Amino acid sequence: MTILSGRRLASSRPLPTAGLLLLLLTGSASAADFQLDNLKLDFGKFVVSIPKLDVKGTPLDRDSFRALLLSGTSAAPAGGVAGASQPGESAITRLGKLTASEISAPTLVMEQSFGPQKQVTTYRNIKFFDISEGRIGRGESSDGTIKVEGAATGPMNGEIKRTSFEVLDLMQIARIFGDKAKPGETAPLQPIIGKIDQDGYVLDLGEQGKVTAGKASIRGFKARVASEPMGELLTRIAELSDESEKASRNLNSKEDPAISEARDRKLLVAMAEIFDAVDYGSGEVRDIVMALKTPPKPGAKAEPVDMRFSRIAFGEDAPEKSGVAIEGLQFEGSGAKGVIGLIGYSGFSLEGVIREIKAVANSAVDIKTLDFRRFIPKLGTVKMSGVQMSVPQDGKRGRPAGPPIQVGLGNFELKAGEQLNGIPTDMTLTLDKITFPIVESADNPAAKDLLAMGYRTIDLSAKLSLAWQEASKEFAIRTLSLGGAGMARLDATGMLGNIGKEVFTGDIALAQVALLGATAKTVELKLQNLGLAEKLIENEAKKSKRKVEDVRREYGMMASLGLAAILGPSDGAKALANAVARFVAKPGTLTVKATAKTPAGLGLADVIALGEPTEIFDKINVDATAE
């Protein structure tokens, strides 16, 4: 992929690797045992200059080989050469004639123009081996340079380290960049490259900073012919991105919103088309370092932001053998810094989203009227772990800023499956060890009490697991838990009934009506004391200057008598009040289970029809225990 302006495509792939693929598209060919000098392949917006080219082991002679390379360019000879390309032959046909044992060039310069941008890439010590009918068995380049001018984000310069590859299909590349699919047809994905390895690159972004990367490896790269030639799509993306970048930087811009929307639609369609036409296969990039500067606010200086990634892996190289994983992320900027051990996803797919984007962008439909759920991707599983961050505090008037706040996250995981109209019908969310300090302030009196009880840091964990069954129209709350280390833990489960697929419809009014018909069948709550109850009582005793046992006894009587008066005289109410009173007197584990007396469950209409709140116990069975 060529370097493109704008933040949208700034970090798509390792740039030198993609540049080499574009180089090979030109058809750098084959010949017997001879040398060609001062070759210039001019394809208009794509020009390749080769001062010296050595060819070995080809069935073509020198003139035939030169004609094969230059045919179809502005530098093509006026007369045909016997045995070489014929007038009117396509690039694919010409590439099919390339056969040689070895092709090498000390230097190769590739110039590409995309709208106002111009990229010049120089490769050194290039060697291709085992070229047969337009396919290269293996190849390498010792190093190279990149230079970009004319981008809205400013000039860029880079250095490429050694790059090598295995099994490259030049004819498929020619098809992708020069052909387009037939209307209504989707071409199959075809292998382009078996494997490519790169030792690294350095990219100087000028005022925006610098990016470096270590070793990279990609295999199984595939692509298909899109609805438009890939070269045209890339040109359009570059031009539209530059226009958007300039508009965003112009604070006095009075551009018509309709123009911005039209441009964004075109850009979105082009990017979706490219994304849909490429399968990156599997691979990894190691040791990425980004020293960037954020765009400055009016009247302020740009602030540096440093980021490091130990590894970015995708496909089979990711821990889940699919998706993407970012490992060992470190960042620092604006006074904040931190580390993230892992960010990754698997089972994620934008296939449906791309299909919807194409349909909407090519129509006159008003975006405001669209159902956003049409654009929800297949979510799969998202993970993040090993988070530690240091966030600076702002100083208050007359007072210096406090020490940085240390926050952390042990593990985050969102697993979604069986989506209906974009909404997951089976989902599990896990949050483990969310840590943050307790900071005392005048507008947070609860913090003062927590500090008085000996808590300096909060350590929370939570989990939510839900599942919907279409056949039974039941919605299960398999797990709902929230707990704090050294404090308490609440676990809940439940079953709702009469939940049909209408709840997931795009018609909000219909979904609301469907939800009103839902019923509650069972609910179970379990509250475990992990030390918070004792500290609450001890803290209250200190504040009121009483004995701990006196406060505990008072709370127990309030729970017993107060709840009994509120809940009424039913057996279920008595069981609940007694269990709560025992829990307060001796905090351990409180378990409460409520089940609707009717198999269909307790609905909203049943609750509304109650004359008194205590009548709820006539419709449910309650089992409560304290241990």
Image (spheres, rainbow, N blue to C red):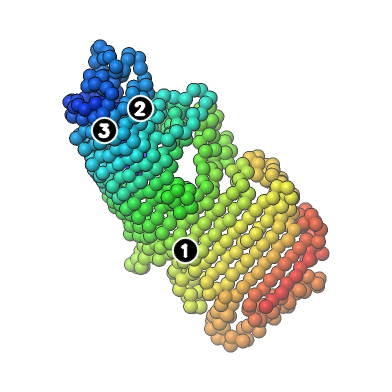
Name the image quarter holding the N terminus. top left
Task: Kindly indicate the quadrant of the structure image that contains residue 8.
Answer: top left
State which tag comes first along the sequence, 1 or 3. 3
Disc 1 versus disc 3: distance between alpha carbons?
54 Å
State which tag comes first along the sequence, 1 or 2. 2
Farthest residue, direction top: 79
Disc 1 + disc 3, Cβ < 8 Å? no
Frontmost of labels 1 and 3 is 3
Residue 82 image offset from top left, x and y in percent: 27, 14
Residue at image position (59%, 49%) is 417
Say above or below: 544 vs 516: below
Disc 1 versus disc 2: distance between alpha carbons?
54 Å
- Left or right placement of residue 545 versus residue 119 in this view: right
Identified by mark 3, the residue type is Glu
Task: Kindly indicate the quadrant of the structure image that contains residue 492.
Answer: bottom right
Residue 355 image offset from top left, x and y in percent: 53, 34
Closer to the camera in the image, 106 or 466: 106
- Give the residue pinned by disc 3: 102
- Give the residue pinned by disc 2: 133
Residue 453 image offset from top left, x and y in percent: 51, 78
Disc 1 + disc 2, Cβ < 8 Å? no
Mark 1, other Cα within 10 Å: few <14 / some 14–19 / many ≥20: some
Residue at image position (59%, 59%) is 464
Q: Secondary structure at mark 3?
A: strand
Disc 3 + disc 2, Cβ < 8 Å? no
Identified by mark 2, the residue type is Glu
Disc 3 versus disc 2: distance between alpha carbons?
13 Å
- Residue 519 shows in the view: yes
- Give the residue pinned by disc 1: 410
